[in-house]
Amino acid sequence: MLPMPGTPAASWAVYRAKLRAVFEGADPRVCAAFWLFGLINNVLYVIILSAAVDLVGPAVPKGVVLLADVIPSFITKLVAPYFIHQVPYAVRIFVFVGLSTAGMLLIALTPASRDGGAIGIRMLGIIFASLSSGGGELSFLGLTHYYGHFSLAAWGSGTGGAGLVGAGAHLVIP
């Protein structure tokens, strides 16, 4: 526990020593890697939710985008733990990158029209991105077992960073 500011025990040396003790044993490369894993895995999810109105237009309920983004990920997290351990991590990551890329391309390259076909293709892209996010979450959280508790903390921080980066990216990039 850190001392209260203004008390005699509150000095920069005390704060530095306490923080150094808390982070003792943390590998900066592992922390950076898992922070990036969390960020990259979740940023597309946040961008899709932030851009819901832009993706389907004002005539379609935004809940459709939310459901297309949440349900496939939920089903993946519900079913995949029973068999995903049979698939090597390298293969999983390759598949999830492919799904995420396909999802982004389907969303980005679909014509801007608001007809049912274009919206359906965008929804398919959202579903691909959701499957990738759910599977990536399972895999990376499972991988934290081999890298200690700092990897889990870094993953969690990266997913929080994805919220800021994704919402900021949607705001800044038209």
Image (cartoon, rainbow, N blue to C red):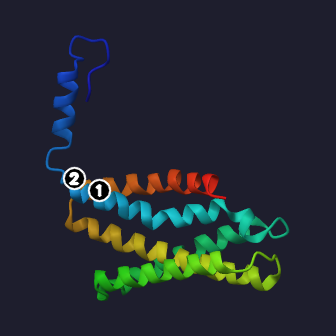
Q: Residues within 10 Å of mark 2 (few under 14, many from 20)?
A: few
Q: Tag 1: residue type?
A: Ala
Residue at numbered disc 2: 28
The answer to whether 83 appears left or right of 151 in the picture is right
Q: Residues within 10 Å of mark 1 (few under 14, many from 20)?
A: some
Rendered view: 69 above or below 7: below
- Between 8 and 107, the residue placed more toward the observer is 107
The answer to whether 64 appears left or right of 130 in the picture is right
Residue 68 horizontal/vertical position (percent):
64, 75
Rendered view: 119 above or below 41: below
Q: Residue at x 22, y 26 (%)?
A: 15
Question: Mark 1 near mark 2, Cβ–Cβ under 8 Å?
Answer: yes
> Can residue 72 be seen here?
no
Q: Quadrant of residue 118?
A: bottom right
- The disc placed on residue 32 is 1
Q: What kind of element bears circle 1? A: helix
Residue 149 horizontal/vertical position (percent):
24, 56
Q: Tag 2: residue type?
A: Pro
> Can residue 50 be seen here?
yes
